[in-house]
Image (cartoon, grey):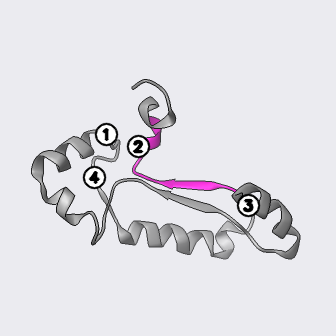
Amino acid sequence: MMETMSMEYAQYDIRINNISPGAVVTEHTKEKFSDLKTCEETIKMIPAREIGNAQVIANAALFLSSDLASYIHGTTLYVDGGMMNYPAFMGGKG
């Protein structure tokens, strides 16, 4: 749907993009990540070796809505510390 919308609205200078967050501490996930074992296991799957927070997602949204991203249309921006680089996250066998 995002790709189709981006093609239809680009002519009106409207950009449609997607942000795909990885492991992020939020009000809904803070209890899960407060468990040391869960936190350590999650960090092992993140090349950046840290769990994100709401601010990194907000920064991505600010970037995509800025003039710096004026030529970016119909794209998914993975804000995941590199998690998608692992084959298991791309539908392969990790």
To which residue does mark 4 refer? 50
In this picture, which residue range is highlighted in magenta?
73-85
| The furthest residue to the right | 11
Mark linked to residue 45: 1
On screen, 42 above or below 73?
above
Q: Amino acid at mark 2?
A: Met
Q: Earlier in the sequence, mark 4 or mark 1?
A: 1
Instruction: Give the image location of residue 7, x and y in percent.
Output: 83, 60
Q: Earlier in the sequence, mark 4 or mark 2?
A: 4
Give the label, 4 or 2, closer to the camera.
Answer: 2
Q: Earlier in the sequence, mark 2 or mark 1?
A: 1
Q: Amino acid at mark 3?
A: His
Instruction: Give the image location of residue 31, x and y in percent.
Output: 18, 63
On screen, 71 above or below 66?
above
Marks 2 and 1, how far apart at CA: 6 Å
Q: Residue at x 44, y 67 (%)?
A: 57
* Location of the C terminus (image quadrant): top left
Q: Are marks 3 and 2 in contact (CB under 8 Å)?
A: no
Give the label, 4 or 1, closer to the camera.
Answer: 1
Mark linked to residue 83: 2
Marks 3 and 1, how far apart at CA: 29 Å
The part of the image, by quadrant, that contains residue 19 is bottom right
Mark linked to residue 73: 3
Q: Amino acid at mark 4?
A: Glu
Is residue 76 shown in magenta? yes
